[in-house]
Amino acid sequence: MKEGHDGSGMGLILKGLGGEFEELKEYPVLSGICSKDGLKTLDDYMNKLGFQLKYTWTPKTKPVKGIESRDYYFARVYDYPDVYKDRPVEDQEALLLNTRLALRRLGESDESIIVFTFYPDILALKEVGDPMQLGEFFGLDKSSLKAKIILAQGRQNTNYAINLYACHPFFIQGYSTMTNGENTAFIPIREFLSGRGFPGYIGYNSDSEVFCHILHHVCKQLGYPLHYYKDIVTPLKAEEIDARPDSEAVRFLKMSLRPLCIDGPNCVIGFTPDGTCFMLQDAKKLRPGVVGGVKGKYGLMSEECGLDSAVSKRDRSTDVFPMKYDMVIVKPEAEEVTVWNQLSG
Amino acid sequence: MEPAERLDKNHELAVKDYPYIIRWRDDRCKRCGKCTAVCPMFSIEPSVIVQRELHSEGPTPEPKTVRRVTTIIKQTTEISKYCTGCGTCTLVCPNEAIEPEYNPQHKFNFHKNKGGHPYRRGGRRNDPTPSTLDTLRFSRISMLTDPALDAGRHEFRIRTYLGRILPAEELPVKVVKGKLEVDKKSGKFIPPVREIYPVMIGSMSIGALSPNMWEGLAMGVTYLNEVEGMPVVMCSGEGGMPQRLLKSRFMKYFIPQIASGYFGWDEIVRTIPHMVEDPCAIEIKYGQGAKPGDGGLLMAHKVLKLISEIRGVPMGVDLPSPPTHQTKYSIEEAVAKMIQSMSMAWGFRVPVYPKISGSHTAKAVLNNLVRNPYAAALSIDGDDGGTGAAYNVSMDSMGHPIASNIRECYLDLVAQGKQNELPLIAAGGVGKKGNLAANAASLFMLGASCVSIGKYIMQAAAQCFGDEYNRCNVCNLGKCPRGITTQDPKLYRRLDPDMVAERVVEVFKSLDVELKKIFAPMGRSTELPIGMSDGISSVNPAVSERLKINFTC
């Protein structure tokens, strides 16, 4: 083990992009990895759909011992096909999702195309290996890449087979999560999500991918406010619900979404489309998790050492260590940190 | 010339033809007569024989032959008085002088049809092999990736829902000032749902059971709810319930059953206006695992005063329930109507669900219920289930095991995305070999929301003698030597209802601990692991393939 990671991989999802992406925020960014053949397949497919390539970013990789380089890492900004330019956002989001899924299927058998995200103002970078070496490999220390929200996980999925699609953080239509823990209720949750009839609820190379899809299901599909995510993944006992002002509704949610209880030791960190970030703990066997920082810059970390390194100049006495009923919510632009308590609603 | 006494004894059965042979020891027996007094079948009787004995008295051996008349215990070879192997004789013998011994070479089934009447009995399928459930293992143990929970220290919530659960998309909720509120004006029907303990006591009627046994179970269930805080519920079986209980506040712990004879329902319906609590649910019995497609029968000699009052029938008449509901002509209409009628009787405040026998056709029933918004659950009773009376051929040869039946039904719901909407109740051989917690947990992981037990609780709470070697199994005759399935006061006074209740409480408390011991190492404590099929495995590849679970070896 190394400080803050176990050296098995790295995943980055960036939101609120700056630098060369600053002016391109309204255009969807396709992030992934291709082989040479895969790139041709990808180009042909995107051209066929009518997507117009506006800008391409690739990391300036340099050989690092222990890191096996793939052919082509990319984040490509496209303009929507003409017929979609004036369509409602829902239609555009569905197009992006379906395109990502189609590309995934095209390259899945031979790993010639691996696509992580296809969404405006979102960039993803993932690879297997030591995170520090990967940072060097991708030249992140010198990169002009900038983002307001960075989800970073220095660890590959270890519960199931090593696969880049199993690498945290996970993303779907503006919602993203990463997790420290193990999801013992993975199979019933996967079966429940797969039965919702939503095309994006596939994959599940990692048991943690369901956390992201539950967030999407709760907030986007069902339209519930964010804190109900906590009520669903870690439901209260019946007598605890009785004390909530919204007890009637919470009782229904607990029953109707019973299979989505995560029932494992998990610390979930994530963000929603409006830039709200959050951290919550499972109802038992707490995993490490801390939130701290200064106005405009907060870190939500699974280790204190990470927070010290990211925001060293802060008042440590205001650090928040969320307990089982807490959901720490950092408002957009890191303006404010609130702790939502599940017992009092 | 024909001898005065035939020597060949043709057309008579030998003791060796019977399933149980009485081993009686002359040297231990003190001729107290207790064994012959208690034998429910009159299989043993005192008899006298002439014995030839050698005697020698005096300082030197001088053997003399003397003939002596002595009393013995003799096993009859009359087939109507066959020894059932119950062992009540052993229980009462002060000197361990008598016990029945199983005879694997018996030819009982060749002969037990005198007068052209097929063999009828109570009990269970005579199949002593372990059920599929008993061969499953819990093999997904959390360790370093997810440290196992501490069964004694962590909080566990072992509960389930009984009732139709609306999908989240159909919930009448709306967001008001950042909070969800139930929209009272939506007019949406919200089906009633009960939160119960996931192991219930299945349907056994007053009538099939003695008053003392039924009362003991009912008291145990009530104590579990009121004192232990465990919401265990119990189904009445067909034949109504005592008025005093119907009008009591304890009614919420009971599930009255309506079956094809509709016995007791005049009395129940008339009592509805006087009820202070709604029942937990209503079970409509369409089938029973032990005798699929066959009706019920309460024999005339079990219809005494109490039973006639509760069921609203004259005393001393056979009470047959037809194999099917006479009003049922199609599942699409009649079953739906019956579910709706029962719901309507309690103002749609009580969950109503059907119970069927395990069968290849269960999926068809399930799919019909899925489309019926008033159907609260589906209870499936597998072929290892028990009964108070049935034809031997039905019990031994008909039916469908519960494991694969519940699994295919659950996976069918999963394919439709409705596995959380219609709870499945699994029954039939749960705890057949005494492994109640393990069998129940396996069924949850295969997809059951709840399991129902019958024989297990009779054995554990009232020491029922029955087993899969056809021991005892005379529940149909009203001769139960334990006083469990009889209406004869001389027999049921042997059973103390308080002691039955105490055992019910002990059984459920220990079950709760054992379930925690299974769930804790698997990392589950907040919700019942329904459908957590990666948790179990089989050492039989065919079983693992059929149940879609892991194969281990």
Image (cartoon, helix red, strand yellow):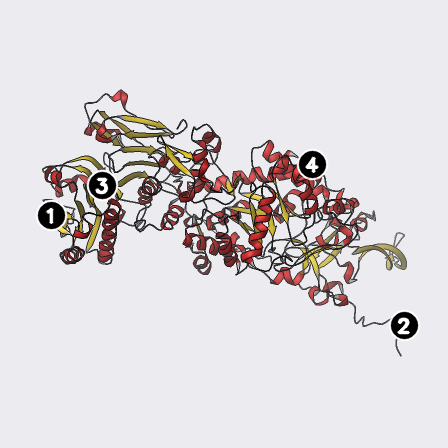
Asked if B283 appears above or below A299 in the picture, the reply is: below
**Pointer 3 with pointer 4, Cβ within 8 A:** no
Q: Nearer the viewer, mark 3 or mark 4?
A: 4
Circle nearer the N terminus (3, 1) = 3
Give the camera-side residue of B129 and B325: B325
Q: Nearer the viewer, mark 4 or mark 2?
A: 4
Dot 4 falls on a residue whose secondary structure is helix
**Pointer 4 with pointer 1, Cβ within 8 A:** no
The residue indicated by pointer 1 is A54
Q: CA distance from mark 4 to mark 2?
A: 58 Å
Q: CA distance from mark 3 to mark 4?
A: 63 Å
Q: Which residue is found at the position 11% from the left and 48% from the top? A: A54
Q: Nearer the viewer, mark 4 or mark 1?
A: 1
Give percent across and percent down for residue B306.
76, 44
Same subunit, tags 3 and 4: no
Q: Nearer the viewer, mark 2 or mark 3?
A: 3
Chain under numbered label 3 = A
Dot 2 falls on a residue whose secondary structure is loop
Packing grade of label 2 (10 A; few <14, some 14-19, many >=20) is few
The residue indicated by pointer 3 is A7
Question: Hey, what amino acid is under mark 4?
Answer: Asp
Packing grade of label 1 (10 A; few <14, some 14-19, many >=20) is few
The residue indicated by pointer 2 is B4
Circle nearer the N terminus (4, 2) = 2
**Pointer 1 with pointer 2, Cβ within 8 A:** no
Q: Nearer the viewer, mark 1 or mark 2?
A: 1
Give percent across and percent down for residue A24.
13, 41
The residue indicated by pointer 4 is B498
Q: CA distance from mark 3 to mark 1?
A: 35 Å
Same subunit, tags 3 and 1: yes
Same subunit, tags 4 and 2: yes
